[in-house]
Amino acid sequence: MPGHLLALDQGTSSSRAMLVDAAGLPVGMAQRELGQHYPQPGWVEHDPEEIWEGQLAAARQVLEQSGVSARDVAAIGITNQRETTLIWDRATGRAVHRAIVWQDRRTAAACARLRAEGWDDEVARRTGLVLDPYFSASKLQWLLERVDGLRARAEAGELAFGTVDSWLLYRLTGGAVHATDVTNASRTLLFDIHRLRWDEALLDAFGIPAALLPEVRPSAGAFGQALPEWLGAPLPITGVAGDQHAALFGQGCLREGMAKNTYGTGAFLVVHTGDRPLRAPGLLTTLAWQLRGEPAAYAVEASIFIAGAAVQWLRDGLGIIRTSDEIGPLAERAADSGGVYFVPALTGLGAPHWDPAARGLIVGLTRGSGAAHLARATLEAIAYQTRDAVEAMETAGVRLSELRVDGGAARNGLLLQLQADTLGVPVLRPAVTETTAMGAAALAAVGAGLWSPAEVAARWRLDGRFEPAPDAPLRGAGYAGWRRAVARSLAWSAAESGADPSE
């Protein structure tokens, strides 16, 4: 019986494919960069065809490079950037507009109007989320209202909406499957996380025709077959989850209280809360996953918009580093940040502040400040933002005993030490830091009946453990200074324009 698993990991900046063997070890990885489009300030878009073509190319490449035939692949798992919104023609399978990316802020006014109408508490109760442009509903509403003819075609059943997982499923199956899983559905602002179904009242509030929506299925289970023309054999798709949920699963955080933080474009702290949805101020209640035939598992999440993207800004915007990997050595040239704080609110602030009008801020500069201080302040900012989220979780009774980490920036030992010092708990880096793709592979294995959840947890291996330094300055005075800096960044664009920050 074929034992390999193919994970398709479609992210914000690239499309990757990872091949995993029967023992749960990666045997190959391929990646294709994904272009970013910025039509206006605050707008972020992707080309849906580039998403599809890049993901397919990465899948073909990893099979070829690994010398593995599609006949040796038991199942496909899909994980994806969440909230990014697409609409396509059901008949042709072609998108009718560029994808509106999760980072996009064009719908801030629409969300503010719903808040003014009193929808805040009801949205939180039903979806576990906050009324913010981050999520899919207002992006979908914008497309229906601003692109000629879309609403009529949507109501006639000619169009399909989906997040990136649904888009890939539709194309892989030749249009046979229009579905999503509970984790991606739970990030749309349209899904009742208690009843596990689309919510009629929210569809009405956003003006979304039900005919657009995909079927919602468990994260591990049957999602149809990829056509043989794509990879050389018909392959079952048996696992689907949004990237942060897949990373939580791939990190083996299968018990209540276990937590992981993924450092990617943003940073995403997720804590497993068992079979109960837990609400914490400023944070998101979400579905961790659902395995076929089992009750749903829940999580509480802090979505931090800018983490690795702050390092990219130092590279591309300021030019003080040539590659992202240079950030660590540059930061190590300074013993501390020299009192410099960088609040990377380059697309507003996410959890726990949820302020789309916040803007990036660098404070504490003196004549002695240099590139090394700014580099260190950038790494500290990533750690401090995670501390903000943990503080919010603690108000709801969540206490971390350790934090498992992954993502590209988890390779940076200085960042992980700063994170441990800031939180005061050990930080654990796994042997396989590509846990998003690993989680997709693990869900596919569970969905195909190849692994049990206990076997997923048993396959996790430790690479490095970072213990917090006693009485680390970052935990006291350093964090107090960070909070002062954040306070100055809040509502910046609203105050600058003279607008009411609540509008």
Image: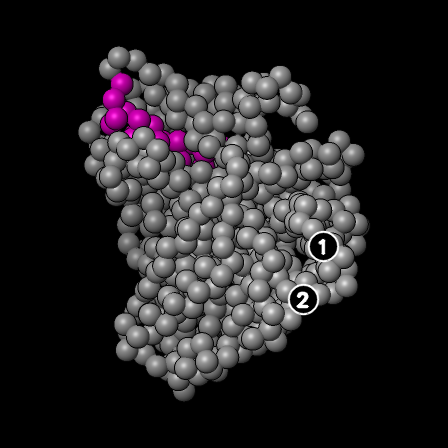
Using the numbered discs, state the Cα–Cα distance from disc 2 to disc 1 in whole angstroms.
24 Å
Return the residue nearer the eye: 84 or 43: 43
* Image point (67%, 66%), residue name: 215
Residue on which disc 2 sits: 215
Which of labels 2 and 1 is toward the front? 1
* Image point (38%, 67%), residue name: 57
How many residues crowd mark 1 within 10 Å: few (<14), some (14–19), many (20+)?
A: few
**Res 457 seen here:** no
> Of the residues shown, which amino acid type is indicated by label 2?
Glu
Residue range in magenta is 369-389
Mark positioned earlier in the residue sequence (2 or 1): 1
Residue on which disc 1 sits: 149
Looking at the rendered image, the quarter that the N terminus falls into is: bottom left
Return the residue nearer the eye: 165 or 291: 165
> Which x, y percent locates residue 161?
64, 59
Q: Name above or below for residue 153 compared with residue 312.
A: below
Q: Residue furthest front?
A: 148
> Of the residues shown, which amino acid type is indicated by label 1?
Gly
Helix, strand, or loop for circle 2?
A: strand
Question: Would you say 8 lies left or right of 86 here?
Answer: left
